[in-house]
Amino acid sequence: CHSEDPPNAPELGLCRRVPQHELDFDYPEIRIMSQNWESPFFEAWILQIVLSEMLDVPTTIETGMPDTNINFYDPQLRFDYGKGYDFDGLERAANDPNIQGDCRIHFQQQQQQQESKQGDHNDKDNDKKVAEYQGCGHAILELWSGHEDTVHRLMAAEAIEPPSFIGVIGEESWFIPKFTA
């Protein structure tokens, strides 16, 4: 089970709670940043399944946007696009002394702030909620070229490990079948 599951999720059959003494790992929760295109969604789902089901590590997928969800285990099967390259969320998870790497604490603090500001709701309030939302996550699984300066800055701040390759080569191009040429 993870932090976005309802409290009665095990009873509903949405997840299973593993007794603490049976856990091989003692992670509070890992949040994977989803990006805003499909291939990182699928990579995040695979990692979420492996971590959750094989290693019993609670795992959620962070979209970087409020009220959006891309978790593989979402009961409503939402497929929401979030924010791409939320480097601030990576840095927040690694270096915010108030949360010490536990993004659940960050989200509880955000919810409390949001609840204290509750009043009349309109479209401007929703726009403000989106602008004020701060993501928090531990991994970005897909990174295209052009972000080298940010990656070096985050490595220097010890917010991330050096990036490595997963073996996938991406390419953007036009494809014209030979029979149409």
Image: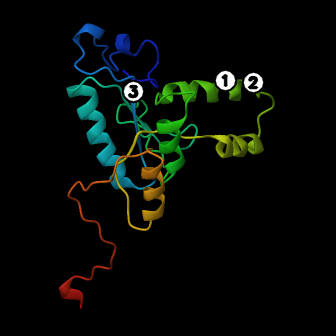
Alpha-carbon distance for marks 2 and 1?
6 Å
Amino acid residing under circle 3: Glu
Residue 112: x and y, percent? 66, 23
The answer to whether 91 appears left or right of 47 in the picture is right
The answer to whether 53 appears left or right of 60 in the picture is left
Q: Which residue is mark 3?
A: 29
- Crowding around mark 3 (Cα neighbors within 10 Å: few <14, some 14 to 19, many 20+) is many
Amino acid residing under circle 2: Ser
Residue 146: x and y, percent? 43, 68
Q: Which residue is mark 1?
A: 112
Proximity of marks 2 and 1: CB atoms separated by less than 8 Å: yes
The answer to whether 26 appears left or right of 113 in the picture is left
Residue at screen point 39% across, 27% down = 29
Answer above or below: position of 167 versus 135.
below
Answer above or below: position of 129 versus 38.
above
Q: Earlier in the sequence, mark 3 or mark 1?
A: 3
Residue at screen point 26% across, 41% down = 46
